[in-house]
Amino acid sequence: MTTKLSRLYDTNAEAQRVVSDLKTAGIPNADISLITNHGESSETMADTTTAEGTGAGVGAAVGGGAGLLAGLGVMAIPGVGPIVAAGWMAATLTGMIAGAATGAAAGGIIGALTDNGVDEDDAHVYAESIRRGGSLVLVKTDDMHRAAAQTVLDRHTSVTVGDRRSEYEGEGWNGFDEKRGPYSASDATAPDRSRPGMM
């Protein structure tokens, strides 16, 4: 039976350490994914955006251990901005972007996360956190590797999703809004009414 695990980190560096430790623990590369805020402007990305990019800029963005994951690519996600995605979620997000470009109902980043086993409320927090510079590590694991993956994930300090949701809601946030652009400091002071009825 396949189990999907996810953890949110405030920094790309911590997420990279987790990915590296997962590999060291014997978790297959194909079972690990990373989504991290790229931290570059759309103009800079225009030269590096690919569906399956493996350029030096992409590798540098995700660093040593995570840079070895398959499906590495830089892409612009509606509501988030530039991200680097690696592993099996890179293909999911690439398909989501292609679907949106052709008018297909792809469901956005929230749909991509929930389709891969993430609770919808948590998916909103994950997407907003990535928008604000965070990183998400996802692992799909079989029974043989589940304990090892869980041990690695528990050893690193991740964001407590409920606490982060409360923090965002204290700013007036109601949920992730894919119509918004990349995060700026002024967003923290402007009420977010993106999910009517949520507050």
Image (tube, helix red, strand yellow):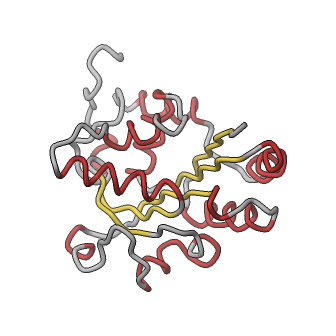
Q: Position of residue 164 (x, y in %)?
A: 53, 36
Which residue is most to the front? 1
Give the vertical position of 88 relative to 142 (above or below).
below
Q: Which image quarter: residue 13? A: bottom right
Q: Is residue 157 left or right of residue 69?
A: right
Residue 184 visible, this angle: no
Q: Nearer the viewer, residue 70 or 179?
A: 70
Q: Please determine whether, in this image, residue 52 is positioned above or below residue 28.
A: below
Q: Residue at x 51, y 32 (%)?
A: 122
Q: Does residue 91 appear in this view? A: yes
Please give left or right for residue 159 compared with residue 48 in the image: right
User: Is 31 rendered above or below residue 1?
Assistant: below
Point 26% across, 69% down: residue: 41
What x and y, as percent, mark residue 178? 26, 41
**Which residue is drawn at the image coordinates 82% and 62% (left, top)?**
25
Residue at the image position 73 percent from the left and 66 percent from the top: 23
Counting from the top left corner in percent of width and height, residue 12 is at 55, 63
Quadrant occupied by the C terminus: top left
Q: Nearer the viewer, residue 110 or 168?
A: 110
- Percent coordinates x, y for residue 167 in the rendering: 48, 33
Which quadrant of the rendered structure holds the N terminus? Answer: top right
Picture mark count = 0
Along the line of sight, which residue is nearer the eye, 129 or 33?
33
Please give left or right for residue 97 compared with residue 146 in the image.
left
